[in-house]
Image: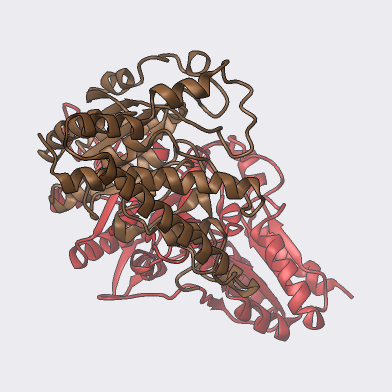
Chain colours: A red, B brown
Amino acid sequence: MAEMMLRDAIVETIRSEMRRDPTVMMLGEDIVGGMGTAGGPEAIGGIWSTSTGLWAEFGGNRIIDTPISESAIIGAAAGAALAGKRPIAELMFADFVGVCMDQIWNQIAKFRYMFGGKSKCPVVIRLVYGAGFNAAPQHSQAVYSMMTSMPGLKVVMPSTPADAKGLLTQAIRDDDPVLFFEHKALYGTKGEVPDGDYLIPFGHARLTRAGEHATIVTCGMMVGFAEAAADSLAQDGIGCDVIDLRTSSPLDEEAILDSVEVTGRLVVVDESPPRCSLATDIAAMVARKGFASLKAPPELVTAPHSPVPFARELESAYLPSPAKIIDAVRTVLAYR
Amino acid sequence: MQLSRDELLGAYRRMTTIRVFEERLHDEIAKGEIAGFTHLYCGQEAAAVGVCDHLANDDFIVSTHRGHGHCLAKGVDVKGMMKEIYGRATGTCKGKGGSMHIADIDKGMLGANGIVGAGAPQAVGAALAAKMDGNGKIGLSFSGDGACNQGTTFEAMNMAVVTKAPCVFVFENNHYSEHTGPAYATATATDIAGRAEAFGMKVWRANGCDYFSTYETMRELLAYVRAGNGPAAIELDTERFYGHFEGDPQRYRGPGEIDRIRAERDCLKAFRQRVTEAKLLEDDDLDRVEAEVHQLIEEAVVEARAAPLPTPAMVLEDVYISY
């Protein structure tokens, strides 16, 4: 075990997987940084510092600094994967999926199926997502919900440095395409990270707090908010299960249903907007499969049906918060 | 460079296979035997075969919605393809892809593609994979004059140049983007290769209705790319004998246009004339190839009709490798 920041867990995982497997490669904008400038290669080293030192160790054939061409980045990753490599493509901001959606949506997600199961496309797309940085409507979105709706993709969002390692290692070794969502506000989060080979299988949620009164289901940056809410409620004698999904596709339905069977009360916390979202998906699943367990209508704590605003006050109002989660838990508990 | 008798017969067989395969599809679609959208490649056979005759299984190509010719030229199984287009469980893609999505990775065929322009970046990726291995292999994108107006094509060309990827961009200019002419849709209607040139690529131009023109030009181009000089492009001037899709009434064609291109720009006729006049092959040799191909296509149709249909449970197969 070593304590490190989530961003370092990412770069160390990529480094060790690249050492282990010569087919792993990486491509993205400014992942080396400074190419073609007076400062020279690695003058920046990736704006999120999640690729620092990789170019120096593995060279330009495996660490490919690309032009600003998201369709070509994801398309090239797709082609390299079909040709036998394990590419890791970085989207500097998850919002940029809009630029390259065809390559994700119509290409990578569908190859195996439409080619009759005779191909594999082991691409990892790392997407830097999330609000809280005053980065405004086009650099702040949590777009994992729409990706979760697309068959053929796996969708992952780590909340701790240890999970970042375990889930990214799994993602790189996984034979299916994986969208790996990294919340920009979590890069500096510190935590203990297991040494050596560490894989977390997809579809296995993590129970981060245990309690018998309510179930809080969440992911990504919202996990910390849910834990803060649960810790605060615990002081009032209210116990909450906090379930960190880790992956939204596949979804650990069992973990959610087992918890709701005990608590009978569900709160889903989701950073994405509320319509056709991860939150509504989980609420619908529980309504259908866990109806008999429910003692109250599920509460959804989500972003509103609006773009992510810029100003601090507006963005705070936009994001879910521990206080909003506490209110939601009290609401489900107060129901009859 | 003079091709051997076997090489010539092989080229004629491959081009004829595409022609007969598709003319049969045309007939069967008209009878209602085949569902969905089918885009025929007839008229462009010299392009696919003239290019792919230089490629090995581990040279990777990506193709288009008009992809049957590229698949067949790259060695994808004729009968498997016919079954696929018939929507059979034993088709190349188990009936999941159909005409527009035939792929065979083992043959280096990374997929026909229903999205115009989607393939070019994928060819760059295959080329970057080859560059990583340093094995002299290439990634090659077939696209039409329609796809040359997609941003993905421009992104791909730029990225190939700046990463020095061993990538080949083949532009088959058949003078139609679906139902629209290049004079309207393409800013450099008579010069697509010039676009690649503008990205700093070395480019070639050839007659895509002439096997020898395409084949000999590609020899030179591929020697350049395989030597590690980075990407290159070629524009092939060719013709589409049928509509954009089967069922297209083609009201956009000029009077007598189809008769003219079939009379003047048929790659099979040109090939036959060239090799018989040069006494490289006899008419009988070519007739025999044609008879064998007709037999093969007949068998392919008979077997496709008899092949098992997919079952509803197969809907959920192959979405993931593990889930």
x and y, in percent, of residue B189 in the image: 42, 15
Q: Residue sitting at 24 percent across and 29 percent down?
A: B274
Question: Compared to A58, does A287 lie above or below?
Answer: below
Q: In this image, B226 relative to A210: left or right?
A: left
Q: Residue at x 28, y 76 (%)?
A: A197
Taking the image as shown, residue A211 lies to the left or right of residue B243, namely right
Q: Nearer the viewer, residue B21 or A42?
A: B21
Q: Quadrant of the N terminus of chain B?
A: top left
Q: Residue at x 22, y 39 (%)?
A: B165
Q: In the figure, A95 relative to B147: above or below? A: below
Q: Position of residue A312 (x, y in %)?
A: 58, 39
Residue A283 in view (yes/no) = yes
* In this picture, residue B240 sits left or right of residue B7: right
Depicted A232 relative to depicted A102: above or below: below
Q: Position of residue A199 (x, y in %)?
A: 36, 75
Q: How many marks?
A: 0
Horizontal and vertical percent position of residue B192:
36, 20
Instruction: Look at the image and tell me whether residue A186 can be seen.
Output: no
Q: Nearer the viewer, residue A297 or B243?
A: B243
